[in-house]
Amino acid sequence: MAGRTATVARKTKETDISVTINLDGTGQHDVDTGIGFLDHMISQMSKHGRLDITMRCKGDLHICDHHTAEDCAIALGEAFDKALGDRKDIRRFAHAYCPLDEALTRVVVDISSRPSAHVELNLVREKIGELSCEMIPHVLESFATEARMTLHVDNIKGKNDHHKAESAFKALGVALRHAISADVGAGVPSTKGVLS
């Protein structure tokens, strides 16, 4: 399980992104996407997942936040998948419940190589900071697709949209930390013999 790190560069006409991830880190983060609230969410995932993440993005924010938020999630998911490698000797399944004051969110993950995301955050505001609330589930979905995992995110209760979103990213970090942790001797955790 040594050396689970990856760097991904993604450049399009809309965004220019670099991301480095260490799955066996301490939660260090240095994130600058150009969208403050997105930086905050990725930093929460990093800290509580013990994932070291460095990310830089220059995006077409003069248009809107969509391309930047989506492409950052795509690049982060791709880096996660690349760093994870052959998916041997990991727990594979995990869940976490994380509160933030009145908000409580449950995240369940399966590091299955089968991309699927189901996100219910019950957000009501148009934006949090400069991030459109409609993009928050899309960020999670895009990350799960590129990371090749099944992801369920359900806000169970809450009134404040900032709290609901933040509790989701904290819970995602905690669930990922457990799902990718060592299960020595498990081999590939599938009766098919492969997770690819």
Image (tube, rainbow, N blue to C red):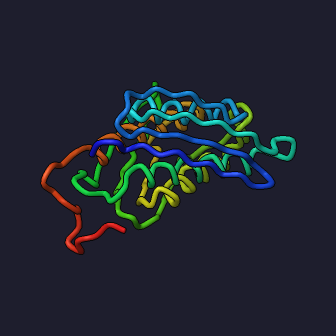
Between 156 and 100, the residue placed more toward the observer is 100
The structure residue drawn at horizontal position 37% and vertical position 51%, both measured from the top left corner, is 84
Position in image of residue 39 (x %, y %) = 61, 32
Say which quarter of the image contains residue 123. top right
Q: Is residue 78 left or right of residue 114?
A: right
The structure residue drawn at horizontal position 26% and vertical position 43%, both measured from the top left corner, is 181
Total labels drawn: 0
Q: Residue furthest front?
A: 3
Q: Is residue 174 left or right of residue 69?
A: left
Between 125 and 20, the residue placed more toward the observer is 20
Position in image of residue 58 (x %, y %) = 75, 39
Between 130 and 74, the residue placed more toward the observer is 74
Position in image of residue 129 (x %, y %) = 71, 31
Is 113 rendered above or below residue 192? above
Say which quarter of the image contains residue 188. bottom left
Q: Quadrant of the C terminus?
A: bottom left
Q: Residue furthest left?
A: 185
Position in image of residue 166 (x %, y %) = 52, 33
Is 115 rendered above or below residue 101? below
The structure residue drawn at horizontal position 47% and vertical position 40%, both measured from the top left corner, is 21
Is 21 rendered above or below residue 154? above
Q: Residue furthest right?
A: 62
The structure residue drawn at horizontal position 44% and vertical position 54%, both measured from the top left corner, is 81
Q: Is residue 162 left or right of residue 181?
A: right
Between 33 and 82, the residue placed more toward the observer is 82
